[in-house]
Amino acid sequence: MTCLLVGFLLPQAHADVPSGTLGTVGSDTLAGLMLRWGEQLTHQYPGVRLQLQASGSASAPPALTAGTTRLGPMSRPMTNEEREAFIARRGYPPLEVEVARDALAVVVHRHHPLDTITLEALDAIFSRTRRCGAEHDITRWEQLNLDAPSRRIELHGRNLASGSYGLFRQRALCDGEYHHRLNEHPGAAAVVAAVTESLDAIGYAGLNHLAPGVKALALVDAEGVVHMPDADSVRRGDYPLGRSLYLYLNLPPGEVLPAPERAFLDLVFSPQGQGTVTELGFVALPEETLSRQRRELGLVP
């Protein structure tokens, strides 16, 4: 979980009072957090407004590249192709900052008998390629040796525009392909709602979307180690489906951060901003990460 701040030496802050509209295009996962930060920023600087379009992480790079937004929240890192497309158009790389940490929790109905699942079995359930090593597809609950009715497993996940879709494919499916039976949803809340309504369902969603109607499963890795989807595991980097959450900016090298963006990042890295991260169910950044990024961005300590 590293953050790259490549090629930018930012001048010291100027005294402009922040005002104007902050347009953001990107992650659905980060939408609630961005909106809450925006409300806090407007409370501090009434002249600033946040305008959010939460179409999924995949929508951020083309919007940044085209110049239709300066801020792109993403629940995954930019791919090499996305970064290269930005550089080809702009002549410099996007500025990447880590704003919080999160994880994908594998969820079942709260009354489901399953409590843990191996990563190999997870792949055999969700993928048609089984690159993680399973010999057979798992399509029915009794294949997991559960004392459960003989029923077909319902699969729920995100759609292609989501960073969660890509992360789960990479980490849980060993870069394999999803099963054709996957029910794709445009938002994590819809995944959780679908699992809440069916004892036969399994899905994945960010920690901040967990609800009383679902149960998050512990994951068992290839060495037999059990990993709980909790803040400590995510902060340590132990949880197999942990991730960093990012904000990408279109900022030419040597240019000063515009006052609204600067004020926004100052808030994000403040105790108040990181307190909001925790309040909304994400994982706050370690203090050393906050200090390093504030220093690299030239923000006031």
Image (tube, rainbow, N blue to C red):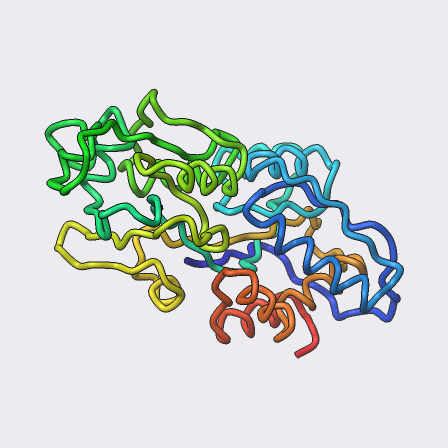
Q: Position of residue 82 (x, y in %)?
A: 54, 35
Q: Nearer the viewer, residue 195 or 272?
A: 195
94 above or below 199?
A: below
25 above or below 242?
A: above
On-image quarter of the C terminus = bottom right
Q: Residue farthest to the top?
A: 180
Q: Position of residue 180 (x, y in %)?
A: 34, 20
Q: Position of residue 98 (x, y in %)?
A: 54, 58
Does residue 278 show up?
A: yes
193 above or below 219?
A: above
Does residue 87 show up?
A: no
Q: Residue farthest to the bottom?
A: 301
Q: Nearer the viewer, residue 46 or 151?
A: 151
Relative horizontal placement of residue 145, taking residue 92 as reference (left or right): left
- Residue 175, by quadrant, is top left
Q: Position of residue 111 (x, y in %)?
A: 31, 48
- Residue 17, by quadrant, is bottom right
Q: Residue at coordinates 33% horizontally, 64% vertically from top-left?
A: 233
Q: Residue at coordinates 46% horizontally, 34% vertically from top-left?
A: 158
Q: How many marks?
A: 0
Q: Residue at coordinates 58% horizontally, 43% vertically from top-left?
A: 27
On-image quarter of the N terminus = bottom left
Relative horizontal placement of residue 115, taking residue 237 as reference (left or right): left
